[in-house]
Image: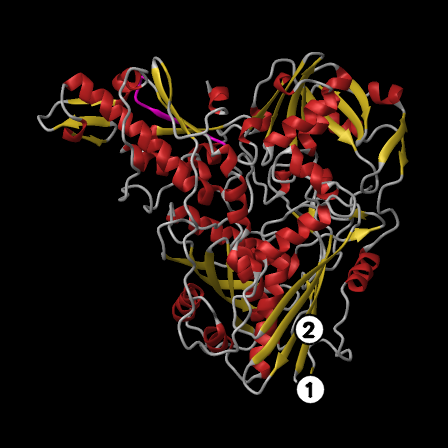
Amino acid sequence: MVESMARRQFLTFLVTAPILTVGAQWAAPGTSPRASAQPGAPGIPSNPEVGQIVDIGDLFITVGLPTALILVIEVVPDGRIRFELPRAELGQGISTATAMIVADELDVPVDQVDVRLAAAKPELLFNQFTGSSNTIRSLWHPLRAVASVVRARLVAAAAARLLVLPTDLRTENGRVLARDGRSLGYGELSAGAASPSLADVTARPKTSHHTVGTPTRRQDARAMVTGELAYTLDIDVPGAKPVMVRRPPTINGSPEWFDEATARQQPGVIDVAMIPTGVAIMAETFGEALDATRAFDVTWRPGTIDGLSDPDIRARLRGAVPPYDDPALSSGSLASGVLDAEYDFAFASHAPLEPNTAIADVRPDRAEIWSALQSPIITREHIALELGLPLDKVIVHVTQAGGSFGRRLFYDGALEAARISRAMGKPVKLMWSRIDDMRHGRARPASHHRLRARLGTSAVNAFHHRAGFVETDFRHGLGEILTAAYTQLPVVGNPVFGQTLFHLTQFTPYEVGAKTHELFEIPLRMPTGSWRGVYSGNTRGCEEMFIDEIAQHLGRDPVEYRRAIIKDHRVRDVLDTVAREGNWGRDMPPGFGQGVGVHEEYRSAIAVLVEIDARDRRKPRVTKAVIAVDVGKTINPLGLEAQMQGGLSDAIATTLSAGLHIVDGLPLEGSYSQYHYPRQGDSPPDVTVHILESGDDPGGAGELGVPASVGAVANAYARATGTRPRSFPINFDIDFEPFPR
């Protein structure tokens, strides 16, 4: 039934008795015009940057048009609504948000809508890719269009049953009501609405909303906190036994030989297999499998960065970012009207609560995979190639994820599980240990930034930013094999993909004269990946720090100066909100400070004001945060608030305390006790989120909160301590005993 939808090239409906199922292919309307700056805004006008004209979300929506965002909604006989979501639920709340959209269009309570994650469907091409804060942006119009077709057909079926005109009927609470008081439930109308003989109907999405925009608790919240929510390893696949892998002592090493006899003799061990990434051990329990991985000898081939440590990588980054042509100036110095600054950021782990997991059942003629995947289409395509199977003989199920932050854009766990299952000839349940997930998982690349501003007497004449990153791995492409193959072409592949993404996301929201952004990447073979915000967390974060320095040199208050040079009134509005609600400029005791940052991306705007207690510079704590956000149309205010709080937590982590030390080809950190992500006692006890609305279409939100928060936290620390940090995280000592390699 769903397969046939791939061949539809127009808005249509798919009917299969006895229930109504509707799918649609939808072409997005033109992008809404961006709000213009208020007239007379001070500052020297700046050239428009690419990301201000077309952003990464626009690109994803555009390339998705040929496959038309096929969606499927079912009305089942008991009246419940089922929606098959072609995205990954990673904890960001999109299952609830999309259920709210469907509920609004169908006039049903949101708890009557069941959202299921769609299995990998290659016919969707670019439209089963979860990333770049794009899910709600890309689904808002098509999902409403599909749901409106469902509603129209239910009304038409009721009109035929009640012998009245459709215009004499209305929908309410899962029923179709006539003016004379008669009514029919959706469930009893489903078969009739699915009939091919039903006349064509006219469907229009609703213009008013009773659920969208209303604070709504997550549908999966209770199951999540009670342990009822099923993650990958909770799925019961007959015969699948626990598997863990003995991994190399350096990144991307591989096994050459192992003591198989000793490995097989360990308690509980069922089977062993050598694969490209290590030695897999199957046992009766995960505990026995983990113990067994430590009990035998292995000879390893070298990894790809053996012998390299943080100082070596930092030197390469600095060497990759060319200095400006003018005579070198020390960081933070002002001479001849030129202000320079440099910033460094460490590698950062995604550190989702659920480590990498997958289930695989590979047979000679078929394969079935279960895993939390942001790119399920290329997962299916790559596994089919790896196993030498036809694509239609490989099924990939998308499961609920226990966090991601970009980690699950890659499918290394699913591919590894498939390899192990093939080698052992048995279904497997694979789990990476926490140590392996931090040391051999993917990380946000380290980066080095050179910024320069040319200052006049009262304004900035030019603003330049040269950003150097360890290369981000984009071999997932846009979620399918063609663009993924492009990223692997010599020279032009991943570098061009990275440059494109950088310039579609990075722009400075200020009038600061001539602006340039340049990306320089060093191609170290490391398991990197997009981390929440991709380039923005570092690039825009340090720009917000630099704006504070510029304001200081111009003798301006940081908020007043930003307000004067902001281009878009939406950004100015969120800044005004946090300054007012956060009581910007109030007297602070010694060792305390306020900081502010703003950011504009994904057709959304945010400002963050924080207060920090830095009396103990080794253990600073953000004590208060005020966030104002404008994402255009807000679907679920509670979900948006949670996203902003999550972005703030990530920014506090990577600005103050959390990073990965690379020593001799391997990260030292291997657990939450070593990777210093904020605990509850480190989190601000006072956080408020103010939601502004400025349009009828939603923008992106999932990654929006990080960059502004990075700038705000660093600026608050600088004001509290009287020093301007240049290297992040600020406190980055090795204060633990690393696990053995």
Query: Which residue occupies 40% across, 71% down?
Result: 38
Q: How is the image coloured?
A: secondary structure
Query: Which residue occupies 32% across, 29% down?
Result: 149
> Relative to residue 138, is residue 81 drawn left or right?
left
Residue type of the residue flagged with mark 1: Ser
Magenta stretch contains residue 81: yes
Residue 428 vertical position relative to residue 471 in the rendered view, above or below = above
Magenta stretch contains residue 520: no
Residue identified by numbered label 2: 341
Give the label on residue 393, or none.
none
Residue type of the residue flagged with mark 2: Ala
Question: In terms of image quadrants, where is residue 166?
Answer: top left
> Which residue extends farthest front?
9
Residue identified by numbered label 1: 336
Tell me the CA gap for discs 2 and 1: 15 Å
What percent of the width, then of the height, locates residue 623?
Answer: 50, 63
In this view, the residue in front, 638 or 412, is 412
In this view, the residue in front, 380 or 667, is 380
What percent of the width, then of the height, locates residue 53?
Answer: 51, 58
Start-end of magenta stretch = 77-86
Q: Is residue 724 visible?
A: yes
Q: Is residue 270 visible?
A: no
Question: In terms of image quadrants, where is residue 382?
Answer: top right
Residue 297 vertical position relative to residue 57 in the rendered view, above or below = above
In this view, the residue in front, 321 or 685, is 321
Q: Nearer the viewer, mark 2 or mark 1?
A: 1
Which element carries disc 2, helix, strand or loop? strand
Mark 2, other Cα within 10 Å: few <14 / some 14–19 / many ≥20: many
